[in-house]
Every structure is written in C-alpha cells, then in structure tokens.
Image (spheres, rainbow, N blue to C red):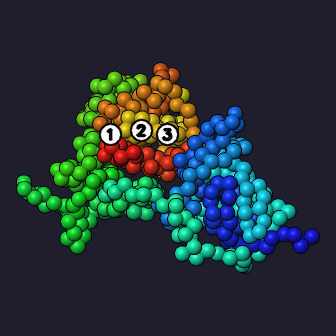
Amino acid sequence: MFQNKVILGSEEWCSFPELGIPTIKARVDSGAKTSALHAINIAPFIKNDANWVKFDINPIQNNTKTVIHCEAPMVDKRIVKSSSGFREHRYVIQTQIAIGDSKWPIEMTLTNRDSMGFRMLLGREAMSGRILVDPEQKYLLGQPTTESLVELYKNSEKASSGLRIGLLASNPELYSNKRIMEAGEMRGHEMHFLNIKECYMKLDAKTPEIHYRGGKILNQFDAIIPRIRPSITFYGCALTRQFEALKVYCLNSSTAITQSRDKLYSLQLLLNHGVDIPTTGFANSPLDTDNLIKMVGGSPLIVKLLEGTQGKGVVLAETKKAAESVINAFKSLNANILVQEFIKEANGKDIRCFVIDGKVVAAIQREAMPGEFRANIHLGGTASVIKVTAEEKKIAIKAAKAMDLKVAGVDIIRSAKGPLLLEVNSSPGLEGIEGATNKDIAGEMIKAIEKNFKIK
C-alpha cells in the first residue's frame, strides 16, 4: 500500500506550474487540515463567467523584492479564526502542485504569512492517499541553491523606483513597522528605520540638520512616515517638523499629529466640520460634577483621560454615585478628563475605518471581550470584516480631512441616532485590520507616498 506514495520530510520544496511559481519552500504538516499559501493584494474577479482571484506572492522568505503575480479559480470563501482571535475571510483556490515527479490538484487558502516561517503550508487534505511524512527528515527531494533560486526568479525582480523613505518610529519589531518596511522594499524603495529616541536636531536658519546615532546626518530623504507613540508625541512631532523644514515629504504632518493627540481639541475640530460625536462634557472644577453628569444624559456614562490611548484611562461608570467618585478621583490627581454619553445599543462593538489619502481602504468591526465595553484589540477585543455604510464611509473620510491626516484610523460607533465618531488615530495599528481583511494596508500607505511623487 506504500509503494506509490511519496515520502517527504517535515520541510520540502514544491512548485505550482499553473501559478507560475517555479519553487517554494513548504512546511509539511499533517496536523493541519487545509493547505495555505502566502498571498498579498488579493482581489476576486470574473473570468469567463467564473469566479477567480488574483494575488501577489513573495515566494522566497525574507525577500520582499521578488514578486509573482498570480491568478487562479476560486472554489470557496471561508472564515478562519486564528489563535490570536482574528476572524479572517480567506479565499480558497484550486491549482496543481508538483512535488518531485508527482503532480496533482489541491485546494489552498490564501493568507498573508509574513509572520510565519514558511510561505507555504501543506496540510493533510492535500497529502491524503499520496504522501507519507517522515518528521525527522528534511528536503528528501532536494533543495535549490541560492544561485539556482536567483536564476529561477531572475525575471520576477521588481525594478526600483528609487525613493528613499524613512520610517520614524520606536520599535522595529512591531508588526506595523515591519510591514511598512517590507511593503516599501517590495515596491522597490530604499527603506530606513529611524528610531525617534536616537535622532537629534541642529536648529539653524541656514543649515538645519537631523543627526542620528554616531553623528550621521540624515539628509536626502524623499519621504518620512511618522509612527509616533503617544508617550513621545512632543519629541516625535518636533522631529517631524524638522524634516518638514528640510523639505522632506511627511505622510502625516507634525501639525495634524499634534492636534489628533489633543482629544478635546480634536473633538471641537470635528464638530466644527459637521461630524457627529457622542454628547461630551468637559469641566475644570469638581464642583460642576452633578451638572456635568446631567449634561451627557446621566449614568451610565464614560469617563476618559485626555492623555489615554488604546482604551487605557477609559472607565465606564454605571451609576451616578460611581460617576461622581471616578470624576472626583481623576480631578484630585489634576487629570484632564472628558465625560461622554454611553451608547448602550452598540453592545461593546465599534468600527475601525482605515483611511489613506481620502479613501477608506479597509474596515473592521471590533468586538469587546465578554464583560468588557472597550473593543480595543490590545485589550483582547476581536476583529472581523464588516461592510460599512456610505454614511459611515463619508464620516470617516470627513474626519480624516478635518484632522488633515493622510493616514488615519477612524473609530465609529453605531447608535440609535446614527453613526457617531469616537476618535481619530494618527498612527493606527495594522495587525488587526490586515489580519482580518487580508488587505495590504502597508502597501496602500507606500502608494500614497508614490502618488505625491507621481510614481505609478
């Protein structure tokens, strides 16, 4: 019964002739039911009255410059829940796999596997009746040399468009930062990670400069992508202003970032542009507590620290007495707070719209954990794909424009009186929304820079 079966190790090289992929390293995993292929820029389309899907793949791990453009018949669309809680809609394709001298059709799901060790996962459904696995072995059918890989993919190397882009941020290992670096490199740009804390400035009317660790002068950058965490807003925006003084294009301006971090000012700015928000109160004196609570419709209500981020410093006060206690406690610490009406009908859900260059490129619904009212992913909330209404898109675009942000995460809540804007984030995270939607949001950010330089 074993005579006609191929024996594979836990890792092997295979190919997909119909997709134009000459070789790709796969993890052979009998513990996984279905197979999965790394894919980005995934988009369905109709071909000869049938459903197809097109996508791009970087077939070589840690090489984002080599790109293959693929298309295949779509046989299904499934919801897959990852170990981190993200619900991801995945397209399923059928194509032929070639391993050694054998070739047969298999089904695979398409997903971004940048964070995984292998571009391809071969599951047991694709192996059934054809393959035996020796988990102690690897590459029983051989493996290509570096030179042969270069030869196989010589026509897939993407030409460089030559922009020098700096990512101004704090943590190079953060998912969002890694993806932006990869997206820029994949589109042929020279990417540099610039740690905010290791930059310093020379203020001079004739020769302003930005220096980096070791005294290196940061010059000749075409563009900067500021990803400034709230705790270093002041210094990060000062650096962004310095780049602007050097005539470097900044994807989000220092002014836009600064005003987005001031929650009170940003809400006032949004209201001035006709964007509806939950009824909100702000006061300086604890003596005004009673009327402040009445102003927003009474309890339950939300109390927010002006400096809070990612759901931190946000408290739900369910009774008037609890609200008074929380407000007075914050006031005793001289903390600036907002008091906001609680939208009970939202049921712990909100919508994150990702706006880039005046367009909603992706949207997810975030749902809080049981017993929690804050839907932030950092607090254990889950993300799923949602279709936003035309009105919600309009609000998101209007909010980003009001804040003068080219890149913004706009949070909206659905209420009985219609969609209301909660917050606008100038450095929105990519992991939750890319994982849920399977869209290349980082690539869209790079495209926005290219558009400024009229690169197609």
Give the residue pinned by disc 2.
355
Give the residue pinned by disc 3.
362
Image location (x, y in percent) of residue 414: 50, 28
Mark 2: amino acid: Val
Q: Is the residue 375 above or below the residue 200 in the image? A: above
Q: Nearer the viewer, residue 354 or 331?
A: 354
Q: Secondary structure at mark 2?
A: strand
Q: Quadrant of residue 53?
A: top right
Give the residue pinned by disc 1.
405
Q: Residues within 10 Å of mark 2 (few under 14, many from 20)?
A: many
Mark 3: amino acid: Ala
Residue at x-position 42% and y-position 35%: 359
Q: Can residue 293 be seen in this snapshot?
A: no
Residue at x-position 19% and y-position 61%: 210
Q: Secondary structure at mark 3?
A: strand
Residue 55 relative to residue 160: left or right? right
Q: Nearer the viewer, residue 151 or 371?
A: 151
Image location (x, y in percent) of residue 159: 42, 57
In three-dimensional space, the C-alpha distance between marks 3 and 2, rounded to whole angstroms, equals 8 Å
Mark 1: amino acid: Leu
Give the mark nearest the N terminus, 3 or 2: 2
Q: Nearer the viewer, residue 207 or 69?
A: 69
Residue at x-position 36% and y-position 60%: 191
